[in-house]
């Protein structure tokens, strides 16, 4: 009995320990359940926060996209308003749009601002100027006697008469000037009556004397501080060319002052590298681009005794010998005028649209010029046809020419178009050439249009410092 009571007591003493174990197990289970509840509540709270943040970011992106669309539509609206200032009158506008739509259907839209890459190609220049001699029969081209209008008198007593560098040629005089015959034509440098101010492009007498002595001339120009000076690569120019070719850079006082402040100051002889600096006083035009056409087209007027001339734009550096260039493009090709085609465009219609799209000039002025050319028989360039030229749009930054009567006449006629219409000479090149050719079928003008990749092989191209604002577009 006593042993049974002892066992019962021992069992009773063990009950609290078991209770502790059981309680601990139950508390653990309770805590685990509570943790799960806390975890579930935390997950739901994190989910709500994530959704809220996602909503806020979505709303922000939507707002930014809406702002972008609004700005884009506003820009299109303002651009349309600006372009409407330069469109043609109502009775002509429909016809112009019709022509543009016809062009777009036939040729596609002009290339966008993203440019394709263009590369140089091989040009078969001689290795040296040694033994270089002008062919005996080279100058066997059309010969006529030409003279130029030097001054104009007042046509009336009207005090509003204003002398102009390009003169006041009538449409009848303009038409007659395209005939190849002995005649006197307008070709710049026209002075007014006695007592009237200079029409511009005045040069120092010492510079005139120097240019008068040149037999071969390489020229360029910078007006209005629009560019840096690019010196010809001296080590690639032969000593013969350095001794016998005149390298002349025309500029105004503003440009000279800017270049001097940058360390490009002429030496005591007036040279910067190979360039002989010639200062032009009293610029003939407010449009710097138009002023630049004077040395570009009228080298036979500026260098009256020169047999050959090469023109290069100020954005280029000459990296080839000028005499080798003349031998290859003129003597070997047996032509009197050489210019490269445009790297992208061949149709004047396309060039017109591109000039307007990029706002290169007053749109109304472009339309007036192009309409005049269309009415006077300017044909379309059809790649599938046998065109007289491989392109109707030139890259006019590099011109090689002999100073023959036909070359001089063409240069005067092209300059007169730039003087009368817009300064965008790519618009008037094909018209001038084709009209001269059409009106003189028995007097050929030997013009060679070479590839643009050849131009790139002979020159190093740079960007302009600053582009002058197109007239009427500011």
Image (spheres, rainbow, N blue to C red):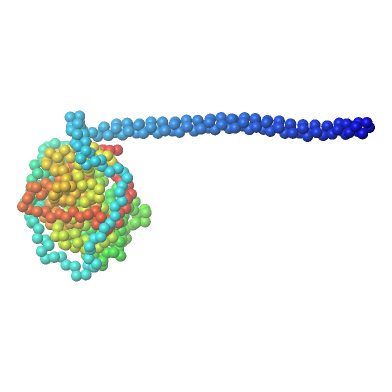
* 293 relative position to 113: left or right: left
Residue 213: % across, % down? 19, 61
Tell which of 362 and 303 is nearer to you. Answer: 362
Q: How many marks?
A: 0
Tell which of 63 and 164 is nearer to you. Answer: 63
User: Residue at left 14%, top 47%?
Assistant: 385
Tell which of 379 and 151 is nearer to you. Answer: 379
Tell which of 254 and 33 is nearer to you. Answer: 33
User: Residue at left 34%, top 54%?
Assistant: 260
| Quadrant of image for the N terminus | top right
**In the image, is residue 303 above or below residue 381?**
below
User: Residue at left 77%, top 31%?
Assistant: 23
Residue 199: % across, % down? 19, 46
Q: Is residue 376 visible?
A: yes
For the view shown, which residue lies furthest in the front direction? 1
Q: Is residue 243 visible?
A: no
* 193 relative position to 242: left or right: left
Residue 248 sits in which quadrant? bottom left
* 38 relative position to 20: left or right: left
**In the image, is residue 460 above or below residue 96?**
below
| Quadrant of image for the C terminus | top left
For the view shown, which residue lies furthest in the bottom direction? 131
Residue 142: % across, % down? 8, 56
Residue 26 sits in which quadrant? top right
Residue 409: % across, % down? 12, 51
User: Residue at left 25%, top 44%?
Assistant: 287
């Amino acid at each position: 009995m006593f042993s049974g009571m002892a066992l019962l007591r021992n069992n009773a003493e063990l009950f609290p320990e078991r209770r502790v174990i059981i309680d601990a197990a139950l508390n653990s289970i309770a805590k685990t359940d509570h943790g799960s509840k806390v975890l579930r509540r935390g997950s739901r709270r994190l989910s709500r926060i994530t959704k809220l943040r996602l909503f806020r970011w979505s709303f922000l992106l939507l707002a930014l996209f809406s702002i972008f669309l609004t700005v884009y539509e506003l820009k299109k609206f303002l651009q349309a308003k600006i372009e409407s200032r330069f469109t043609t009158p109502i009775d002509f506008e429909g016809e112009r749009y019709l022509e543009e739509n016809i062009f777009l259907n036939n040729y596609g839209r002009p290339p966008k601002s993203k440019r394709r890459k263009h590369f140089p190609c091989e040009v078969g220049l001689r290795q040296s100027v040694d033994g270089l001699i002008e062919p005996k029969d080279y100058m066997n081209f059309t010969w006529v006697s030409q003279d130029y209008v030097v001054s104009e008198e007042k046509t009336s007593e009207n005090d509003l008469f204003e002398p102009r560098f390009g003169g006041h040629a009538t449409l009848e005089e303009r038409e007659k000037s395209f005939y190849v015959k002995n005649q006197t034509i307008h070709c710049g440098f026209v002075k007014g009556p006695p007592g009237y101010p200079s029409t511009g492009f005045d040069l120092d007498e010492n510079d005139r004397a120097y240019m008068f002595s040149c037999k071969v001339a390489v020229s360029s120009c910078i007006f209005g501080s629009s560019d840096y000076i690019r010196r010809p690569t001296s080590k690639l120019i032969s000593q013969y060319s350095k001794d016998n070719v005149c390298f002349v850079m025309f500029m105004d006082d503003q440009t000279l002052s800017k270049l001097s402040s940058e360390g490009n100051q002429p030496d005591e002889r007036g040279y910067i590298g190979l360039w002989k600096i010639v200062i032009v006083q009293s610029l003939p035009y407010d449009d710097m681009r138009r002023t630049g056409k004077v040395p570009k087209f009228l080298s036979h007027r500026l260098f009256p005794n020169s047999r050959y001339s090469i023109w290069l734009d100020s954005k280029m550096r000459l990296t080839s010998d000028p005499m080798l260039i003349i031998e290859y493009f003129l003597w070997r090709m047996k032509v009197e005028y050489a210019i490269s085609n445009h790297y992208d465009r061949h149709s004047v219609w396309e060039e017109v649209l591109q000039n307007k799209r990029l706002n290169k000039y007053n749109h109304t002025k472009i339309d007036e010029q192009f309409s005049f050319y269309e009415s006077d028989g300017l044909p379309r360039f059809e790649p599938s046809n046998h065109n007289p030229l491989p392109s109707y749009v030139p890259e006019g930054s590099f011109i090689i020419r002999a100073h023959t009567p036909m070359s001089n006449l063409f240069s005067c006629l092209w300059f007169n178009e730039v003087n009368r219409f817009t300064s965008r000479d790519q618009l008037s090149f094909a018209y001038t050439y084709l009209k001269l050719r059409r009106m003189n079928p028995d007097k050929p003008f030997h013009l060679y249009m070479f590839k643009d990749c050849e131009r790139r092989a002979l020159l190093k191209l740079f960007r302009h410092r600053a582009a002058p604002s197109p007239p009427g577009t500011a």
